[in-house]
Image (spheres, rainbow, N blue to C red):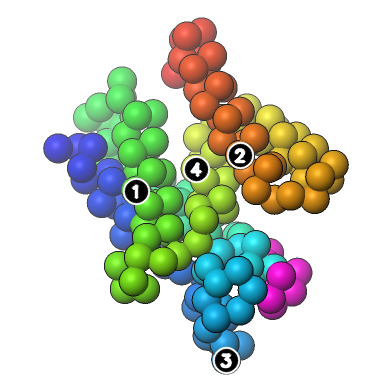
Amino acid sequence: MERVICLLIGYVFGLFQTAYFYGKTKGIDIRKYGSGNAGTTNALRVLGTKAGLIVFAGDCLKCIIAVCITRALFSTGHPENIYLLCLYTGAGSIIGHNFPFYMGFKGGKGIAATAGLILSFHPYFIVMGVVLFFGAFLTTHYVSLGSLLVYAGFMIQMVVCGQMGLF
């Protein structure tokens, strides 16, 4: 039951579409420009660097806040499962970001929300994520390649740290 609650907490926070709302303050629907999705990269391309940074921060923060709420609710009752419950919350936030019901299940790609999950998880993971993302992006200029490498690196780090007993 706790896992379902964590997914729902994450989904509710993931529904806040930062790019969409920021675009509305500028008088545009971000989904009608650029790549057509309501994410950080599209906001960066369409609205500029300042907008991209604001949207990135908002998308990261929604996942971080959801994970903090999960930690506050479940850390005393389930300390042995808190990392798993935080992963469920992060997954819910990413699903809410990617598939918001009020926007016809068409949101962003979940990259910044995933960055928020990684930021809220463990400080050790931040360094590897930054190195992987910017190493790939600065070399190839593909955001998607950097994002995929961050995902793969995060999963590898989770397995290695779990086997080493760091959780």
Q: Is residue 111 above or below residue 121?
A: below
Viewer-side label of 2, 3: 2
Three-letter amino acid code at the position of disc 3: Gly
Residue in the picture at 38% in, 43% down: 91
- Residue identified by numbered label 2: 148
Residue depicted at 41% across the width and 66% down the height: 106
Looking at marks 1 and 4 on the same chain, the residue that comes earlier in the sequence is marked by 1
Query: Which residue is denoted by mark 1 in the rendering?
Result: 92
Residue 95 percent location from the top left of the image: 37, 52
Q: CA distance from mark 2 to mark 3?
A: 32 Å
Q: In this image, 25 relative to 91: left or right?
A: right
How far apart marks 2 and 4 lie (CA) works out to 15 Å
Magenta-colored span: 45-54
Number of residues whose C-alpha sits closer than 10 Å to that of mark 4, classed few (under 14), some (14–19) or many (20 or more): many
* Residue 144 visible at all: yes
Query: 125 and 139: which one is in front?
Result: 139
In the picture shown, does residue 11 fall above or below 153? below
Q: Earlier in the sequence, mark 2 or mark 4?
A: 4
Mark 1–mark 4 distance (CA, rounded to whole Å):
11 Å
The quadrant of the rendering that contains the C terminus is top left
**Is the magenta region chiefly helix, strand or loop?**
helix
**Mark 1 or mark 3: whose residue is earlier in sequence:** 3
Q: Is residue 10 magenta?
A: no
